[in-house]
Image (cartoon, rainbow, N blue to C red):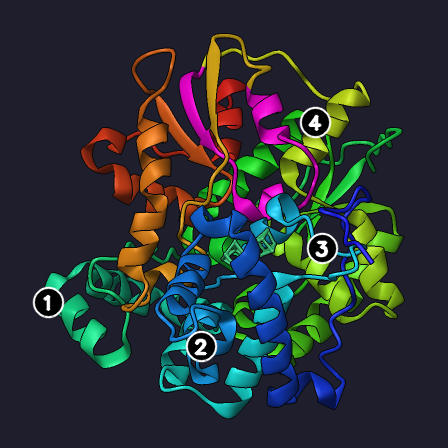
């Protein structure tokens, strides 16, 4: 029997069988890792995507047999630890994903291995669980008297070195500051605009603010609300919101993902069924609702309702433009913008809607970079991965600095964490130029 080189059909993904005890069977997982690693060793297409593949290929090449069977099973974790579940290998490179008979889903196999590791416990479990508790950290750090102390500590070189030794956060990694009051406390009520449903877009919006925007950069969320208001789109916030669960997923803590899902999905599903579009200004959170939760809970009708109502903000705005319901008069040119498309937006398969929207602004030249920044949520701030994260992001930082139209006015990424990571990689060349694309759109509209 011959095996086809690549599938001609659209990639599909299997549900994640995380509630089946067999999912946590280490020997079965290792057998599947060996099967997949062997295919990857013969293929090697993904060598430049991240550090997981070079780690694997080095292990193979340095083994006694120079094949996967020469790699110790105990070394498989070295590959697993390098994967931050960006999904790019699955979505953009791999010809062997389902429905191909080799049935290869590298990121979700890494997820399974991470889930087994998490259950067994790792030496960095305390640090990893703390960093991924974004909601709890945000609630504590934005208490008014606490917020200044927390921010001062994260800017103090000596405390950062202490923090690196104590909990393993790299002393040089960019860390977000916390803001009080939070976005949800600052957000103004929507004006009573009439609801105008379009062919492609519901006419009323729920903003899922996300931990990052709520606790760290409320300005991004406020800019989104200004843009919605300018376009006469009524909006609301969820009554109560918890973390979407992506940081816990990246850690393999799937029980914690399920607990967060139980808090967020019922109210979101109610709003979705009432005809709202749901917008989240962080691509990883959007992807959680569009892809990961539906694969973890394929039978759950509420999850499906939320998935169907979920939009990336620029996806929604671009569709609103197609509906003829978006203001396209812009008063401020943006000049030369280097725009980085985040991995978790690429894998949503909605096209380059942020670029499309920014290019509607007269006097704006967009230089688009489609490559991983290397930040990857909490992964890039960890002591053992930060240098690698900067190395992965180096080509992006270089390309962002080389705008073909001349001197750079702005650097922007849909992923604000990635944006700051790129800024760190660019050094002085990025000074004063960082903005979220929603902020750029608000500026282009001439809104203050
Ligand atoms: S999901 Fe991303 S980080 Fe993980 S192996 Fe694939 S490309 Fe690398
Ligand atoms: S994930 Fe697919 S494309 Fe990438 S190295 Fe493995 S087999 Fe090749």
C-alpha distance separating marks 3 and 2: 24 Å
Q: Which residue is mark 4?
A: 318
* Along the viewing direction, whichever of 300 and 445 lies nearer the viewer: 300
Residue 245 shows in the view: no
The furthest residue to the left:
158
Q: Residue 342 magenta-drawn? A: yes
Between 84 and 150, the residue placed more toward the observer is 84
Q: Which residues are magenta?
A: 334-358
User: If you read the primary sequence from the N terminus, does the residue marked by circle 1 or circle 3 appear first?
Assistant: 3
Q: CA distance from mark 1 to mark 3?
A: 47 Å
Q: Mark 3 vs mark 2: which is more N-terminal?
A: 2
Is the CB–ligand 2 distance for label 3 below 8 Å? Answer: yes
Q: Is residue 292 found left or right of 277 in the rendered image?
A: left
Nearest to N terminus: mark 2 or mark 4: 2
Mark 2 vs ligand 2: CB below 8 Å: no
The label number, if any, that marks residue 71 in the structure image: 2
Query: Which of the numbered marks, if any, corresponds to residue 158?
Result: 1
**What residue is disc 3 on?**
97
* N-terminal label among 1 and 2: 2
Q: Is mark 1 within 8 Å of ligand 1?
A: no
Q: Secondary structure at mark 3?
A: loop
381 relative to 213, above or below: below
Which residue is more in the foreground, 18 or 157?
A: 18
Which residue lies at the image location 80% right of the left edge and 41% below the top edge? 8
Coordinates of residue 439 in the picture (x, y in percent): 48, 32
Q: Residues within 10 Å of mark 2 (few under 14, many from 20)?
A: many
Quick check: marks 2 and 4 in contact, CB under 8 Å? no
Q: Residues within 10 Å of mark 3 (few under 14, many from 20)?
A: many
Q: Which label lies toward us, 3 or 2?
A: 2
Mark 1 / mark 4, whichever is N-terminal: 1
């Amino acid at each position: 029997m011959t095996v086809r080189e690549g599938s001609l059909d659209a990639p599909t993904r299997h549900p994640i069988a995380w509630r089946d005890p067999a999912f946590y069977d280490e020997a079965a997982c290792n057998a599947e890792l060996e099967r997949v690693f062997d295919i990857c060793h013969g293929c090697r297409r993904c060598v430049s995507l991240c550090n997981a593949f070079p780690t694997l290929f080095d292990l193979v090449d340095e083994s006694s047999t120079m094949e996967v069977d020469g790699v110790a099973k105990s070394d498989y974790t070295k590959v697993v630890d390098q994967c931050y579940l960006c999904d790019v290998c699955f979505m953009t490179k791999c010809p062997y994903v389902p429905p191909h008979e080799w049935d290869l889903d590298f990121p979700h196999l890494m997820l399974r291995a991470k889930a087994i590791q998490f259950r067994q416990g790792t030496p960095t479990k305390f640090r990893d669980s703390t960093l991924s508790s974004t909601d709890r950290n945000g609630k504590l750090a934005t208490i008014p008297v606490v917020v200044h102390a927390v921010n001062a500590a994260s800017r103090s070189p000596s405390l950062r070195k202490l923090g690196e030794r104590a909990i393993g956060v790299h002393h040089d990694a960019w860390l977000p500051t916390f803001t009080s009051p939070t976005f949800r406390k600052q957000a103004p009520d929507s004006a009573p605009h009439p609801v105008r449903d379009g062919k492609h877009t519901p006419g009323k919006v729920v903003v899922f603010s996300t931990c990052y925007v709520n606790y760290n950069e409320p300005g991004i969320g406020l800019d989104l609300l200004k843009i919605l208001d300018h376009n006469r789109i009524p909006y609301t916030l969820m009554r109560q919101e918890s973390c979407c669960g992506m940081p816990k997923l990246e850690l393999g803590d799937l029980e914690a993902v399920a607990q967060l899902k139980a808090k967020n999905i019922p109210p979101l599903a109610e709003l979705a069924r009432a005809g709202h579009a749901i917008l989240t200004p962080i691509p990883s959170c959007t992807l959680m609702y569009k892809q990961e939760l539906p694969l973890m809970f394929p039978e759950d009708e509420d999850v499906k309702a939320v998935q169907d109502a979920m939009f990336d903000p620029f996806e929604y705005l671009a569709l609103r433009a197609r509906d003829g319901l978006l203001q396209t008069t812009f008063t401020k040119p943006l000049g030369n913008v280097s725009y980085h498309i985040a991995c978790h937006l690429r894998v949503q398969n909605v096209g380059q809607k942020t670029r499309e929207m920014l290019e509607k602004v007269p006097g704006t030249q967009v230089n688009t970079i489609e490559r991983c920044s290397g930040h990857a949520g909490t992964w890039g701030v960890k002591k053992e991965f930060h240098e690698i994260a900067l190395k992965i992001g180096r080509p992006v930082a270089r390309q962002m600095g080389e705008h073909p139209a001349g001197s750079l006015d702005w650097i922007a990424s849909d992923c604000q964490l990635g944006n700051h990571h790129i800024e760190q990689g660019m050094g002085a060349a990025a000074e004063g130029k960082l903005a979220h694309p929603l902020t750029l759109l608000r500026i282009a509209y001439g809104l203050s």
